[in-house]
Image: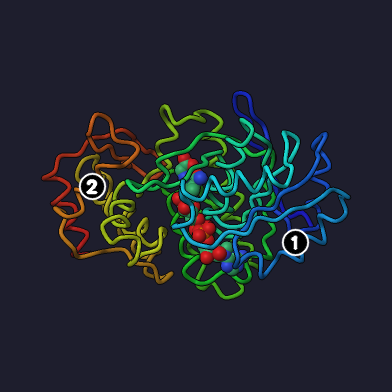
C-alpha cells in the first residue's frame, strides 16, 4: 500500500521518493525503467536475514535474473578496500550497463552500493530502498554516495542520484532503539533548519519508539524531512553553497565520533550532542535565543538521546580538521540565527568554541 510520495527535481535529475507499507509496488517502480538486463540487490547480513525472502518474492514478478551481494554490517565495511571485491563480483556475474543495483538497507549500504553504482562501468543505474529511519529521512535522498578511507569518513565519493527511492516502512518494525535515535537526530536537524510546523509537532507528540513504525508521526518524519531535503538538493546538488546547511550538528558530531574512535556513540548520538553544541555556538555568535537550545535539549532528553559530553574541547578541536567543509584548513560551521534561518560557512574562534563547549557541559 502506498502511503505517500515526494518528488525531487534538480538540474539534470528528477526522481520519486515513495513511502510504501511493504514491498508491494516495488516491481511496478522497477518496470518504469527501460531495458534492464538484471538486478543486483546489495544489502547487509542483518537486513538479508530479516527481509531478503520478502523482497525476492516481489522481484520475482519481474522475470529478470536477480543476484545478491551481502555485506557485513557496520561502517567499517563501507571502505575503499571492499570496493574492488564488489566490482569483481559484479563483473563475474556478467553485470553490464543495463544492470540495476538496489541499495537495500541503511545508510551504510546506501552510500556503499551507490558508490559502486556510480563508478562500475562509469556508472549504472541504482535505486535506494532504505530500511532505517536515518536512511529514509536523509541518506537515501540527494545522491551523496561515498566510502571511507583511513583518514576519515566519506572522504571518497560522488554526487550520483538514484533512479528512485522506495521506502518500505514495515521494515522499520525491527529497527533497534539506537537506530531509531540516529534517524530522529536528523529529523530534529531538519526541524531546526526548516522550522516546518508538522515536523515540530510530530517531534513534540512522539513519546516512545514502541510500534513507532505504525504511527502517523513516522510518516510525517519521513515525508516532511524528504520534502525539505529535496528542496535544498534541487537548488544545490553539489553542495557549492546552501546544501551545506544540512551539516548542522555534524562538524562537532563527526569530531566526537572520530575522537571516541566510533565506539562510544552511534552517528545519531554524536550528532545529537553536536546539534546542541552548535546551537550554543549559535547563541554566542548569531544571538540565537537560548530557548531553542533548551527546547532541543528537552526533546532529546524525552527521547532518551545524549545531549552533552564532558571531555575537553582541546582534544575535540584536533578532530574537526578533516571535516569536508573545511577550507584552507579553516573549520567551517553551520549556525542558526533563528529556527528556519541557518547560515553556513562560518568560521568560529577557538575561544568561542571552548566557551560554548563549557556551556553545553553544564546544560
Ligand atoms: P547502518 O546502515 O549501519 O544501519 C544500522 C544498523 O541497523 C545496521 O546494523 C543494519 O544492519 C541494521 N538494520 C538496517 N535496517 C534494519 C531493519 N529494518 N531492522 C533491523 N536492523 C536493521 O546505519 P544508518 O544509520 O542507516 O546509516 C549510517 C550511514 O549513513 C553512515 O555511513 C553515514 O555516513 C551515512 N549517511 C549518509 C548520508 C548521505 O546523504 N548519503 C546522510 C546521512 C548519513
Ligand atoms: N546529509 C547531508 C547531505 O545530504 O547533504
Residue 22, numbered circle? 1
7 with respect to 266 (left or right)? right
Ligand 1 within 8 Å of the CB at mark 1: no
The residue where tag 2 is placed is 281
Quarter occupied by the N terminus: bottom right
- Density class for disc 1 (Cα within 10 Å; few <14, some 14-19, many ≥20) is some
Which residue is situated farthest in the bottom direction here?
210
The residue sitting at 58% across, 59% down in the picture is: 71
- Density class for disc 2 (Cα within 10 Å; few <14, some 14-19, many ≥20) is many
**Is residue 205 visible in the rendered structure shown here?**
no
Q: Under tag 2, what secondary structure?
A: helix
Question: Are the two marked residues, 2 and 1, in contact with CB atoms closer than 8 angstroms?
Answer: no
Q: Please state which of the two labelled residues, at mark 2 or mark 1, is closer to the viewer.
A: 1
Q: Position of residue 271 (x, y in %)?
A: 37, 55
Q: Position of residue 92 (x, y in %)?
A: 69, 46
Marks 2 and 1 sit apart, C-alpha to C-alpha, by 42 Å
Which residue is situated farthest in the top direction here?
11
* Coloring applied to the structure: rainbow
**Closer to the camera, 93 or 3?**
93
**Closer to the camera, 349 or 87?**
87
Q: Position of residue 355 (x, y in %)?
A: 13, 52
Q: Under tag 1, what secondary structure?
A: loop
Amino acid at each position: 500500500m502506498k502511503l505517500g510520495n515526494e518528488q525531487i527535481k534538480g538540474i539534470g535529475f528528477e526522481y520519486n521518493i515513495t513511502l510504501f507499507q511493504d514491498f508491494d509496488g516495488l516491481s511496478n517502480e522497477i518496470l518504469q525503467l527501460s531495458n534492464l538486463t538484471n538486478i543486483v540487490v546489495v544489502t547487509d547480513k542483518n537486513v538479508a536475514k530479516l527481509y531478503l525472502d520478502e523482497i525476492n518474492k516481489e522481484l520475482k514478478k519481474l522475470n529478470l535474473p536477480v543476484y545478491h551481494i551481502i555485506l557485513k554490517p557496520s561502517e567499517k565495511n563501507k571502505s575503499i578496500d571492499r570496493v574492488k571485491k564488489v566490482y569483481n563480483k559484479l563483473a563475474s556475474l556478467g553485470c553490464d550497463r543495463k544492470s540495476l543495483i538496489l541499495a537495500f538497507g541503511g545508510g551504510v549500504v546506501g552510500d556503499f552500493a551507490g558508490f559502486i553504482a556510480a563508478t562500475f562501468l562509469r556508472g549504472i543505474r541504482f535505486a535506494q530502498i532504505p530500511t532505517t529511519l536515518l536512511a529514509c529521512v536523509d541518506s537515501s535522498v540527494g545522491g551523496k554516495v561515498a566510502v571511507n578511507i583511513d583518514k576519515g569518513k566519506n572522504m571518497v565519493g560522488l554526487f550520483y542520484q538514484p533512479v528512485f527511492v522506495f521506502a518500505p516502512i514495515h521494515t522499520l518494525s525491527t529497527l533497534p532503539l539506537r537506530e531509531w535515535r540516529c534517524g530522529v537526530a536528523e529529523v530534529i536537524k531538519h526541524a531546526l533548519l526548516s522550522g516546518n510546523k508538522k515536523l515540530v509537532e510530530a517531534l513534540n507528540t512522539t513519546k516512545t519508539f514502541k510500534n513507532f513504525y505504525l504511527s502517523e508521526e513516522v510518516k510525517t518524519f519521513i515525508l516532511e524531512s524528504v520534502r525539505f531535503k529535496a528542496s535544498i538538493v534541487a537548488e544545490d546538488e553539489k553542495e557549492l553553497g546552501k546544501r551545506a546547511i544540512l551539516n548542522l550538528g555534524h562538524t562537532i558530531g563527526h569530531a566526537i565520533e572520530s575522537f571516541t574512535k566510533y565506539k562510544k556513540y552511534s552517528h545519531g548520538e554524536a550528532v545529537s550532542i553536536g546539534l546542541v553544541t552548535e546551537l550554543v555556538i549559535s547563541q554566542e555568535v548569531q544571538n540565537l535565543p537560548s530557548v531553542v537550545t533548551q527546547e532541543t535539549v528537552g526533546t532529546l532528553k524525552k527521547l532518551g538521546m545524549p545531549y552533552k559530553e564532558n571531555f575537553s574541547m582541546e582534544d575535540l578541536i584536533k578532530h574537526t580538521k578533516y571535516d569536508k567543509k573545511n577550507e584552507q584548513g579553516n573549520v567551517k560551521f553551520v549556525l542558526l540565527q533563528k529556527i528556519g534561518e541557518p547560515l553556513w560557512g562560518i568560521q568560529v574562534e577557538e575561544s568561542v568554541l571552548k566557551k560554548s563547549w563549557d556551556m553545553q557541559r553544564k546544560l
